[in-house]
Image (spheres, rainbow, N blue to C red):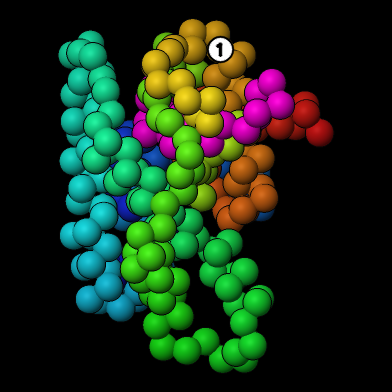
Amino acid sequence: MADHIQIPQAWMRNFQHRDNGECVYSLWLNSGNITSEKIKSLGAEKNYYTKDFEHHLDVQWETRLGLFFEKTKKHYRNDEKMELSEDDILFLKRFLAISVSRSKTYQALDCWHSNRKIPYLGYREIPILSVEASNGILFENYSCRFLFNTSNIGFVLPSYSICYTYHDKIIFPLMIINDKIAILFDKCGKTNSYSISDELLTRDVNRWAFITECYTNHDFIIASKENDLITLRSDIIRLY
């Protein structure tokens, strides 16, 4: 069975298109190619986690994440006021900590700093369990607010799951929910939501998603529209 290493299917489905089943468009950093990939196999590896642990991730984290996404998207579609409860905020901060501990980057750093020569049984699961056991969270002193994208360019999602943006000498972590909704972690304490209508600002966010992926997993970025990735690729080529 193919286990998703970091980004669960429930998250990828927020970017799916239905031209050929459940698929997303992917920009591969190593080649620069853009392809349509099946969600069930993208970012997945056969028997990556033990069977019981894969079930644990599904029950404890991924199912709840999917429910949160559905609630959020429903409010957005109905143009209803969207607020994050304290439980939502704590869950998201813990989920992202778990997500980072699942990343290829974290696993590589863990191996680099370890004296082991041969991977031991459970070496992929133990870092995640350690984060769970410590109740570790990311962005502990950050408030959360919604960021809505009303431009003609959609947000993209790096395989690392977190996107870091930089504005006015301040770093703002972002959790991209889908092409129109993101959650911004703000150390300034602001909680009011706001919208981006300027296409250039959305493209800037996407460039930062690319930079984040470059310095972490260096794997792939997904989008719901192929043109969003074509635009991103063109922006990166011009940048360099």
Residue 120 position (above or below residue 64): below
Give, as a single range, the part of the protein colored magenta.
166-185
Q: Is residue 164 left or right of residue 20?
A: right
Q: Residue at x 48, y 43 (%)?
A: 139
Estimate the x, y position of residue 106 in percent, counting from the top left.
55, 64
Q: Please check the rendered image and state whether residue 183 is part of the magenta-colored stretch, yes or no.
A: yes
Q: Which residue is mark 1?
A: 199
Q: Quadrant of the N terminus?
A: bottom left
Question: Observer-nearest residue: 122 or 224?
Answer: 122
Q: Secondary structure at mark 1?
A: helix
Q: Residues within 10 Å of mark 1 (few under 14, many from 20)?
A: some
- The residue shown at (27%, 36%) is 86
**In the drawing, does residue 88 fall left or right of residue 216?**
left
Residues 43 and 178: in front is 178
Q: How many marks?
A: 1
| Picture residue at 34% right of the left edge, 64% below the top | 132
Q: In which quadrant of the rendered view does residue 43 lie? A: bottom left
Query: Which quarter of the image is occupied by the C terminus?
Result: top right
Left or right: 153, with 126 as reference point: right
Tell whether 78 sits left or right of 101: left
Nearest the eye: 16 or 52: 52
User: Which residue appears at 71% of the width and 26% of the height?
Assistant: 169
Residue type beneath disc 1: Glu
